[in-house]
Image (cartoon, rainbow, N blue to C red):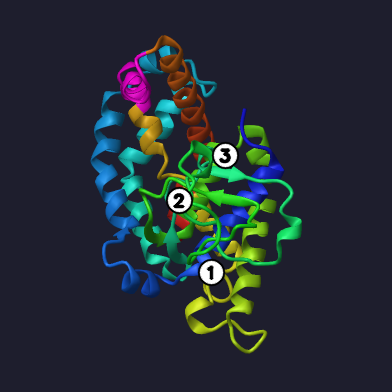
Amino acid sequence: AGISALEAKRGMEAMARLHASFTVQEATRAWGWIRSTHDILLGYRALFRSSVEQISREVIDTVGICVPASVALDTLRGVHQSNGYQRMIDATTRATACHSVLHFDMRGHNMFQREGTAGCGSSHETGGSSDGVRGNNVGGGGGPGRDACAPVILFDWQNISVGNVCCDIAYFLSGSLDIASRRTHERELLTAYATERRRIARERSGDGGTPSPEHACLFDECTDEFLWQQYRVASIWPLVWAAATLASPEKLAVASSSTSDQAQESGRIFMRTTTERYLQAVIDLNSLEALDECT
């Protein structure tokens, strides 16, 4: 099962706080080592291409996803044959108005959601880099970007990068919600994200109303409709994991878990579920059509 709509809303607001915490310029000045999302996606391009070329309907049938094998294969081949993966990279890279610091592994498993934080105060810093839910808690508060009272703590930061915020949003919504919930709530969840971004931009503006130029994302070029279009386009990027799973499901199941039968079965369930969610998102959102519209 996916996360609930309420959990997704909290996750989207946590993402908004992260994305509003630093501009790309601030992040690259502070962290000279930070990677570009563009470069990471370029690294995935060959994996996507080679995986799609290995997939057949028979292999898809053995995985047992809810998307019909013919539809799944046509979707993956359609992206591959139209150079859609490279065009997605180009389109999300060009949309600089929506660039910021990304978590880039933004999913329900990497969020710790806490209850009973209402009395802690009104700080709106980002959820922070805490491994709180896996026994590696480094504490809340007391450091930049950490809020001890935040309802959501983000953790597992090994993929932090700078790029298009919709790469975080698309990965989160398409993979963390079940298909029906995503279809029902994705528009309102994008609105919740944009609302939180606007609130933070106004707080940081310095004059109480107009965002400063470096924090103007989602006010000018990155309108709600542009955000929606970029979300549709960015939903193509997680297809790399769907393609890799379908190309070699047993190999990936073993590699992604321990050697116990139970853990391997959990790995297979996880990969099967996210594979069908990523595929269905691209189908539902007409992502290739959105890509054509912005290129």
Frontmost residue, 149 versus 126: 149
Which callout, 2 or 3, points at the residue further toward the start of the chain?
Answer: 2
Residue found 41% across the figure and 12% down from its top: 62
Mark 1 to mark 2: distance in Å?
14 Å
The residue shown at (38%, 54%) is 160
Instruction: Determine crowd level at label 3: few under 14, some 14-19, many 20+ residues with C-alpha closer than 10 A.
Output: few
Left or right, 177 with reference to 291: right
Position of the N terminus, as image quadrant, is top right
Q: Residue at x 33, y 44 (%)?
A: 82
- The one nearer the camera, 192 or 53, is 192
Residue 181 in percent (x, y) is at 67, 37
Q: Which residue is mark 3?
A: 284
Q: Which residues are drawn in magenta?
A: 245-259
Mark 1 lies on a secondary structure that is loop
Q: Quadrant of residue 260?
A: top left
Residue at which label 2 appears: 234
Give, as a three-letter code, the residue at label 3. Asp
- Distance, label 2 to label 3, CA atoms, is 13 Å
Please identify the quadrant where the C terminus is shown: bottom left
User: Going from the N terminus, do you reach mark 3 or mark 1 first?
Assistant: 1
